[in-house]
Amino acid sequence: MPLTRPDREFAPAPDRIQRFASRYIGRRLTRHKALGAPDMDAVKRSRRWVIVWAALAGIVSGTLIGGAEWWMREILVDDWEALSLREQLPYWSGYLAFAGVVTLLEIGFLYWNSLRGVARMMHFCGLDYRHRSPQTPTVELTLQGAARVALEYPSPGSPVYGVDPHAYLRGWKLTLRALLYRLKVSLSSFLLRMVMRRLLGRLTLRGFVPFFVAPLYALWNAWIAARVTEDACLLALGPQRIDRLMPRIERAPEHIRRLLAQGVGEMIMRNQHPHPNLVLLLSRVLATLPGAPSALTVAWPSALDEFARLDEGERAPLLENLTQAALLSGGYRGARKRFLRQVFARCQTPLTHEFIAGQRFEMASNDQRGASA
């Protein structure tokens, strides 16, 4: 069975919203010719503006919602505290309807801001896209990943080259995670408003609620926008970094490439998410193996035993490749940190912060050299 395209492995059946978002990002990209190399200064500016617009949206919506409550209590009704709960109910119904409309408008703006900002950042990150469709499988994979990042979609649960991203996430944990993602996407801003209104409503400075709440909404939106743009930047830089990594991998012996594939598959399961960069790297590594197998069976305990038996000349480059593969899917923390610690410990090799910093510097300096070229 031939090796499937990585974009079809990552999202074999994207829903309508994801397809719309992917097409939107693709159309915005093709308005400009591909740079072919990163412009990191422009990336930083684009990211900054996405965060600023998200924060301004939080200030506007927070002021409108907080100000509406203040107007209802202080202006619309002469003696609010004298009203019974039944008498307050019509006013609260109107207020909640107004707050819901403002929240929906804000969420729509935030999604538009994220999609537009992600497209700009991918352009300035030097993604090598075509000016017209269809795009290459690598670009299609990146577009699908960017759409999911901008929409804050949960991890797709379908197997990727035989690797189950949810292998370590079963039963009630999987259901709870899906529920939390839906709440985060649809209700997080609205719930924050309701909670803060109740907390600040007990203060004697009730008239100043808009001034307290609006900055909190701005910080909340800015934090989400910062996380989305960070993920988008990492995603857009991934294909170029993998292209630079592959010549070194292709020169390695077959058993080293098999161990690398095992490590990438294990990282996908540890992350509980098939990060597009890891999907692309796994597809490229599998293509170098005899017969280009279309599926990988992860046997991690056996792979760890093989890691321990490697000599120094084979071990050092493999650990470097695994470290860069881990950094392709995020920062040195959480599941990635535990994974690398386990591998280095089995290889009886110290894992230092200086080594991680050196790998990060190498990746960043390669980006800058590509931009200079």
Image: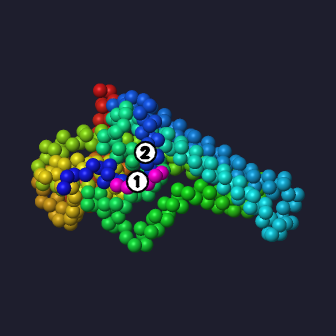
Which residue is found at the position 31% from the left and 60% from the top?
159
Which residue is found at the position 49% from the left and 65% from the top?
179
In-image side of 29 versus 360 (left or right): right
Question: Do we see residue 230 in this rendering?
Answer: no
Residue 123's place in the image compared with 10, above or below, is above
Residue at the limit of the structure toward the right, as seen here = 78
Q: Circle 2 sits in a helix, a strand or a loop, which is it? A: helix
Q: Which residues are magenta?
A: 12-17
Q: Is residue 122 magenta?
A: no
Q: Quadrant of residue 43?
A: top left
Image coordinates for residue 153, horizontal then vertical, percent: 45, 55
Q: Quadrant of residue 155?
A: bottom left
- Amino acid of disc 1: Pro
**Residue under numbered circle 1:** 14
Q: Is residue 13 magenta?
A: yes
Image coordinates for residue 256, horizontal then vertical, percent: 15, 52
